[in-house]
Image (cartoon, helix red, strand yellow):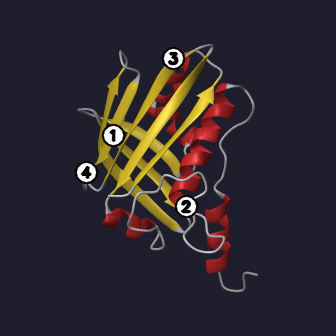
């Protein structure tokens, strides 16, 4: 199962950071592929979005642990899960994210993602290629950083935009 990990320093109080990330309604504000997210009964969630030219709807579980400032989630298909933790560091917070995908989920999202763990700053799939999952994770953390520090909003994933343009007839 491919794993992705990243963290970001945020100059904000850890409790404020955790309050923002643990509010499911804020997810579309900082995760590039998410268009809507809603809480369902029994610690369940529904997330809808778009990756490239593909719309998706995923249902799953979300466990919120305020004492540990930790979120854990999983998709119903058991082919995707992750966690987010907010740590208290000297004069700032740090957000840690870990994602794990089943091969079927990876193939459906983007067939060129390798069947191996990716833990490089600039992962490559070939000459000059960008790993869309790592790119999205970094964009999400950059968005979160910018929002919580009052410096902007959600960032787009340019690799998806370029991929979408290349897929369209007549695109140059």
Q: CA distance from mark 4 to mark 2?
A: 22 Å
Side (left or right) of 81 relative to 25: left
Residue 131 falls in image quadrant: bottom right
Q: CA distance from mark 4 to mark 1?
A: 10 Å
Label 2: element kind: helix
Asked if the residues shown at circle 3 and circle 1 are in contact, with their CB atoms under 8 angstroms apart, the answer is: no
Side (left or right) of 5 relative to 122: left
- Tell me which label, 2 or 1, sits earlier in the chain: 1
Residue that carries the numbered disc 1 in the rendered image: 73
Residue that carries the numbered disc 2 in the rendered image: 132
Q: CA distance from mark 3 to mark 1?
A: 22 Å
Q: Residue placed at 66% from the left, 70% from the top?
A: 128
Label 3: element kind: strand
Q: CA distance from mark 3 to mark 4?
A: 31 Å
Closest to the camera, between mark 3 and mark 4, is 3
Q: Nearer the viewer, residue 80 or 96?
A: 96
Closest to the camera, between mark 3 and mark 1, is 3
Q: Could you say where residue 146 lies in the image, as x and y percent from the top left?
A: 69, 33
Q: Nearer the viewer, residue 105 or 171?
A: 105
Q: CA distance from mark 2 to mark 1?
A: 20 Å
Give the number of the disc on residue 88.
3
Closest to the camera, between mark 3 and mark 2, is 3
- Tell me which label, 4 or 2, sits earlier in the chain: 4
Q: CA distance from mark 3 to mark 2?
A: 29 Å
- Tell me which label, 3 or 2, sits earlier in the chain: 3
**Mark 3 Cα within 10 Å, few/some/many (few <14, many 20+)?**
some
**Mark 1 Cα within 10 Å, few/some/many (few <14, many 20+)?**
some
**Mark 4 Cα within 10 Å, few/some/many (few <14, many 20+)?**
few
Q: Could you say where residue 14 lies in the image, as x and y percent from the top left?
A: 53, 17
Asked if the residues shown at circle 3 and circle 2 are in contact, with their CB atoms under 8 angstroms apart, the answer is: no
Residue that carries the numbered disc 4 in the rendered image: 76
């Amino acid at each position: 199962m491919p794993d992705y990990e990243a963290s970001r320093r945020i100059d904000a109080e850890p409790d404020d950071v955790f309050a923002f990330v643990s509010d499911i309604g804020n997810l579309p504000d900082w995760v590039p592929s998410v268009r809507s997210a809603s809480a369902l009964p029994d610690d369940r969630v529904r997330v809808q979005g778009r990756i490239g030219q593909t719309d998706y709807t995923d249902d799953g579980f979300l466990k919120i642990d305020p004492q540990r400032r930790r979120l854990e989630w999983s998709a119903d298909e058991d082919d995707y899960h992750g966690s987010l933790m907010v740590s208290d560091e000297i004069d700032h917070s740090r957000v840690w994210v870990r994602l794990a995908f089943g091969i079927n989920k990876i193939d459906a999202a983007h067939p060129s993602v390798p069947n191996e763990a990716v833990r490089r700053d600039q992962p490559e799939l070939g000459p000059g290629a960008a790993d869309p999952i790592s790119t999205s994770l970094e964009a999400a953390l950059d968005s979160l950083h910018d929002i919580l520090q009052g410096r902007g909003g959600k960032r787009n994933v340019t690799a998806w935009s370029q991929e979408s343009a290349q897929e369209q007839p007549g695109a140059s």
